[in-house]
Image (cartoon, grey):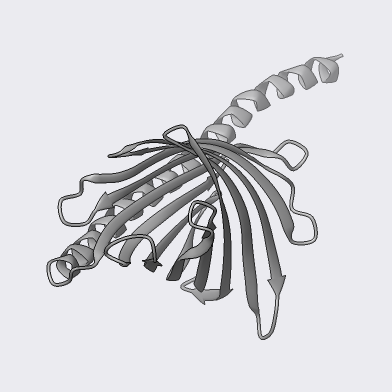
Amino acid sequence: MNQAEHKPSGASGNAPLSAFRGLDSFSHLYHSFLSALRSLLLASLLLGATIRQSAAQSPLLHEVRSELFITSPRIHGFGATVIVEQHLEADDLSPNERIQGLGIVSPVVHGMSLGSEVRQVLTPTGVEHRYVQTMLATVPVFAGFAIRNRTRLEMRDINTKWSRRYLNRTALGHDVDVLGSTLFPYVQADLSYDTRFSMVNRRESTIGVRIPFGHGVNVDSYLTRQSDLKRSPLLLLAGGTIIRVAL
């Protein structure tokens, strides 16, 4: 009889411990997220200073970019994503683009996944709505390197005028162990075909590194050189950071 009474007491005693473990896990995630935000701010400030110094010496366009992607816990492999992105003029930090959106991502099957997004883009000249379909693929190659490819179709409503844009991004990178953390330095190339011009008008070359902070938080810092045949000046140099959070 005493043993039967003791079991319920023990079960109720575990409830506070479970609650404390849950709070501890949340605290670790919260502090990791704050650490990533501090890194984003520091990297943005450093990149911004570098880009602004370059802007003072060159007629090229210059931008500082920050991006945030938060993906919900996955259900049967599917997750919902919140997207916030901002592109700023490097010289005075005035906004060029402010992007907000929602998306859904599929499970990863054989290194491939699909995504669908809706985005609103605010610019000094108007409002754009984008409806985006994406396919992602990762292919291991030689000596531990991996190729990551992103193919994207955007349906664009720019101030009530519809057009399409086809984009392809190919990145080559390799995991590198640094002080117990696995970094992913990479180079990538982007091509963009715009139906408004019926041509591949935009090309980008990027170098970057992805840094894990634990508990589903990763931060990218990158530098991009972009050329656009339908823009003057032709060239743009952008430095930015991306925070990715998987809850």
Q: Is residue 243 above or below residue 178?
A: above
How many numbered circles are shown? 0
Judging depth in this view, the residue of 9 and 197 nearest the camera is 197
**Horizontal placement of 74 versus 237: left or right?**
right
Residue 17 image offset from top left, x and y in percent: 60, 30
Please report the residue visible at 36 percent of the width from the left and 47 percent of the height from the top: 37
In the rendered image, which quarter contains the N terminus?
top right
Residue 150 image offset from top left, x and y in percent: 62, 60
**Horizontal placement of 106 versus 127: left or right?**
right
Please report the residue visible at 12 percent of the width from the left and 67 percent of the height from the top: 56
Q: Is residue 42 above or below residue 189?
A: above
Judging depth in this view, the residue of 117 and 130 nearest the camera is 130
Furthest toward the left, the residue is 56
Residue 212 image offset from top left, x and y in percent: 50, 59
Please report the residue visible at 56 percent of the width from the left and 70 percent of the height from the top: 171
In the rendered image, which quarter contains the C terminus?
top right
Judging depth in this view, the residue of 67 and 57 nearest the camera is 57
Judging depth in this view, the residue of 87 and 219 nearest the camera is 87
Please report the residue visible at 63 percent of the width from the left and 65 percent of the height from the top: 149
Note whether residue 185 is visible: no
Residue 99 image offset from top left, x and y in percent: 41, 40
Furthest toward the right, the residue is 1
